[in-house]
Image (cartoon, helix red, strand yellow):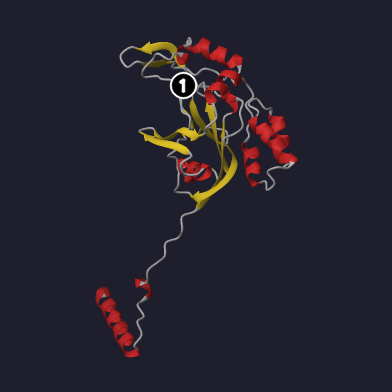
């Protein structure tokens, strides 16, 4: 009965359309425009404070569909061709950012002596060896790349100063739907698996896996090389939104961003002035 009533209704509509000479399909057959995916705004910067140098990218604001990933937001921020992103079974990650300065010289001259001593002690100096074929120290004239300063150096990032949420670790493949709106995605170069950034990290134990020619790793995390890592989330967002990038408030904020062991009070004061 329901099917017959529908057929009669459709026939009546067709007759009416022919009679009036107008093509007017029933609304049920109209094409429906899909709602646009929600957008997410994040703030991205790229720092190499451990090398005592200015950021590769000062904080910028990026707005994308929340179906895009952290890697997409990073590429949007720095510009296509200025970042190398690779995929692995663990997700996408960055191997290098475009940078033509002499970073190995900066590492030799500017990396803190206390950090280097601690790194040598924990790893028994193995990360500085240049005769391990499967753990090379590389030279890249066009990018600041992983393994450029020692065998474990590379890029790390945090989202609002943490590397995970709800027991799930962020990686480049994480969609923006899974990060807070207005989050700061802070990329930082490290020569010690994050220990030189004020974070705990897993370091080699100083021995080699003879079968594969690679490091053996400690199964417990090494504590941070310094305490009191400042949360610069608010500072990064305010710097990105600040219009005058040459005024005193911004330059003071940039100083705090570049200061590896900045205090939280100094960071908060700089953010408040923006």
Q: Quadrant of residue 198?
A: top right
Where residue 264 sits: x, y (%)? 68, 30
**Is residue 256 among the parts visible in the rendering?**
yes
The image shows a total of numbered marks equal to 1
Q: Quick check: 33 above or below 6? A: above
Instruction: Using the image, determine if residue 178 lies above or below residue 219.
Output: below
Residue 105 percent coordinates (x, y) = 55, 22
Q: Is residue 16 left or right of residue 109?
A: left
Residue 215 drawn above or below residue 168: above
Closer to the camera in the image, 31 or 121: 121
Residue at numbered disc 1: 152
Which residue is rendered at x = 75% and y = 39% of the image?
248
- Which residue: 40% across, 67% down? 32
Task: Give the position of the N terminus as an image quadrant.
Answer: bottom left
Q: Secondary structure at mark 1?
A: loop
Front residue (pair 261, 22): 261
Viewer-side residue, 111 vs 226: 111
The picture quadrant where one finds residue 45 is: top right
């Amino acid at each position: 009965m329901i099917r017959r009533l529908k057929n009669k209704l459709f026939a009546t509509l067709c007759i009416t359309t022919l009679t009036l000479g107008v093509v007017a399909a029933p609304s049920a057959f109209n094409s429906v425009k899909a709602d646009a995916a929600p957008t997410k705004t994040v703030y991205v910067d790229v720092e190499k404070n451990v090398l005592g140098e200015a950021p590769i990218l000062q904080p910028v604001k990026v707005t994308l569909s929340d179906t895009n990933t952290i890697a997409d937001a990073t590429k949007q921020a720095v510009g296509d061709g200025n970042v190398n992103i690779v995929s692995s079974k663990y997700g996408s990650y960055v191997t290098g950012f475009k940078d033509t300065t002499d970073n190995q010289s900066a590492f030799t001259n500017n990396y803190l002596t206390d950090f280097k001593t601690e790194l040598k002690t924990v790893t028994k100096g193995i990360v500085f060896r240049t005769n391990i074929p499967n753990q090379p120290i590389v030279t890249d004239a066009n990018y600041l790349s992983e393994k450029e300063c020692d065998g474990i150096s590379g890029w790390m990032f945090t989202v609002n100063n943490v590397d995970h949420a709800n027991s799930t670790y962020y990686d480049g493949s994480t969609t923006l739907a899974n990060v807070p709106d207005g989050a700061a995605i802070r990329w930082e170069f490290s020569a010690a698996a994050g220990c030189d950034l004020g974070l705990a990290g897993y370091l080699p134990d100083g021995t080699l896996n003879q079968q594969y020619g690679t490091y053996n790793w400690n199964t417990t995390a090494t504590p941070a090389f310094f305490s009191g890592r400042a949360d610069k989330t608010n500072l990064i967002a305010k710097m990105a939104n600040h219009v005058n990038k040459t005024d005193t408030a911004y330059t003071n904020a940039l100083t705090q961003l570049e200061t590896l062991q900045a205090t939280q009070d100094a960071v908060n004061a700089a953010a408040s002035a923006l």
